[in-house]
Amino acid sequence: MDNTMKAIETTGIIDKQHRLVLDEVLPFTEKSKVRVIILLPEESDICEKEWLKAATLNPAFDFLKEPEEDIYTREDGKPFHDKG
């Protein structure tokens, strides 16, 4: 028995009845058994607190802790008062 499979990528939605509805017609005319892998988008939005924590702990930003990177003082710029 030959277990080779042909892959076709397409998109679709899961409807209210929990059925997969493809965005396009598949290029087959005969009835055939298929194997389906469903990839769901991950939640990409993380809260600001999580993002800041990740940035703080990331060693890629360690150079910012060096004294020569500390170039601003409290006297630089103007105060910002958020009224939101």
Image: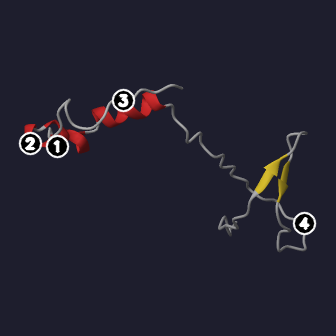
Q: Are marks 4 and 1 in contact (CB under 8 Å)?
A: no
Query: Marks 4 and 1, how far apart in space?
Result: 61 Å
Q: Quadrant of the C terminus?
A: top right
Please name the residue that numbered disc 3 is placed on.
53
Q: Secondary structure at mark 1?
A: helix
Residue beneath disc 4: 31
Residue that numbered label 1 is attached to: 63
Q: Disc 4, disc 2: CB below 8 Å?
A: no
Q: Nearer the viewer, mark 2 or mark 1?
A: 2
Three-letter code, disc 1: Phe
Q: Which residue is painted at 90% across and 66% down in the image? A: 31
Q: Nearer the viewer, mark 4 or mark 1?
A: 1
Q: CA distance from mark 4 to mark 2?
A: 69 Å
Rendered view: 44 above or below 34: above
Asked if residue 75 lies left or right of residue 5, the reply is left
Task: Specify the label residue 28 is tagged with.
Answer: none
Point out the tag, 2 or 1, that comes first from the N-terminus: 1
SS label for mark 4? loop
The residue tagged 2 is 68
